[in-house]
Image (cartoon, rainbow, N blue to C red):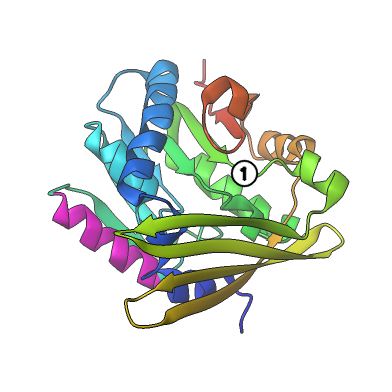
């Protein structure tokens, strides 16, 4: 099984919503945190937002439902197709593209108020040689005064214990049980996540296994990389202060003058 993130999300696209107890409620809940956060720092909008790691649309849909103009892209073609379908079913006018943060060659547009990379997307960039061009590309896509917003796992804490297991979480779909859990294999400051989804399809139990690799980026390391890419006013927000499920970093492209 490939650990490549594009292959991981291509394989996971049809099942990604099963990670959540209720995906629609998760969309609403996350937008309820991210939306006000963007609006307080940039303005009420409607804002022009780029979701540069949109996946199947968890954040894209919620931000668009708040009335903002959203362009969404991801390196996974299957995830983008799923996100496009989900947005269309909700009558949302969102532009989609397949694009890798390291090049953004599939996204000719720019001049965004906000660039968003949520749900631990940046740690898929396993080296500074991958992270640096990605951050520079995202900086260039922002208008002066715009902000970059990313959420990532709390690696400062996780690196102290290097946990081997996450979950299990048990859900029920009309009386049918569903279980989600992860096994983490650490290799220095990198780790492979093995994601297992198990559910009852009415006649038997089905289990799907997906695997991908992450880099555990400390907060001070990411601040240093953001500053080197031209960002200023960098701040970290804790889950305790926002109600979001991961720490959030915000960095601004300062206006000239």
Up the image or down, 64 lies above or below 14; here it is above
Q: How many marks?
A: 1
**Magenta-drawn segment:** 77-90
Residue farthest to the front, as pictured: 175
Q: Is residue 107 left or right of residue 75?
A: left
Residue 151 at x, y percent in the picture: 57, 40
Up the image or down, 196 lies above or below 31; here it is below
* 197 within the magenta span: no
Q: Is residue 247 left or right of residue 126?
A: left
Residue farthest to the left, as pictured: 91
Q: Residue at x 60, y 29 (%)?
A: 239
Residue 141 at x, y percent in the picture: 44, 43
Q: Which of the 4 image quadrants contains residue 249? A: top right
* 78 within the magenta span: yes
- The front one of 252 and 250 is 250
- The front one of 167 and 41 is 167
Residue 43 at x, y percent in the picture: 35, 18
Q: Which residue is mark 1?
A: 152
Q: State the quadrant of the N terminus.
A: bottom right
Task: State the SS at label 1.
Answer: loop
Q: Residue at x 55, y 39 (%)?
A: 150
Q: Residue at x 29, y 67 (%)?
A: 81
Q: Residue at x 61, y 31 (%)?
A: 231
Main secondary-structure element of the magenta-colored stretch = helix
Structural crowding at the residue carrying mark 1, measured as other residues with C-alpha within 10 Å and reported as few (<14), some (14–19) or many (≥20)? many
- The front one of 135 and 30 is 30
Residue 174 at x, y percent in the picture: 29, 59
């Amino acid at each position: 099984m490939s650990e490549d993130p594009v292959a991981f999300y291509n394989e996971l696209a049809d099942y990604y919503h099963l990670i959540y107890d209720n995906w629609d409620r998760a969309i609403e809940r996350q937008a309820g945190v991210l939306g006000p956060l963007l609006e307080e720092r940039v303005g009420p909008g409607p804002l022009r937002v780029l979701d540069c790691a949109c996946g199947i649309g968890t954040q894209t849909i919620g931000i668009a439902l708040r009335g903002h103009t959203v362009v969404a892209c991801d390196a996974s073609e299957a995830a983008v197709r799923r996100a496009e379908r989900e947005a269309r079913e909700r009558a949302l006018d969102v532009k989609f593209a397949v694009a890798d943060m390291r090049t953004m060659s599939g996204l000719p547009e720019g001049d965004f108020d906000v660039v968003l990379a949520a749900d631990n997307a940046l740690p898929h960039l396993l080296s500074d040689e991958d992270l640096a061009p990605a951050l520079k590309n995202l900086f260039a896509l922002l208008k002066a005064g715009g902000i970059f917003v990313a959420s990532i796992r709390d690696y400062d804490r996780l690196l102290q214990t290097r946990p081997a297991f996450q979950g299990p979480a048990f859900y029920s779909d009309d009386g049918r049980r569903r279980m989600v859990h992860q096994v983490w294999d650490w290799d220095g400051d990198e780790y492979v996540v093995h994601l297992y989804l198990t559910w009852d399809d009415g006649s038997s139990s089905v289990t799907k296994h997906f695997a991908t690799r992450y880099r555990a980026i400390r907060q001070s390391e990411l601040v240093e990389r953001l500053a080197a890419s031209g960002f200023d006013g960098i701040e970290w927000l804790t889950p305790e202060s926002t109600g979001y499920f991961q720490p959030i970093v915000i960095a601004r492209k300062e206006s000239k003058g």
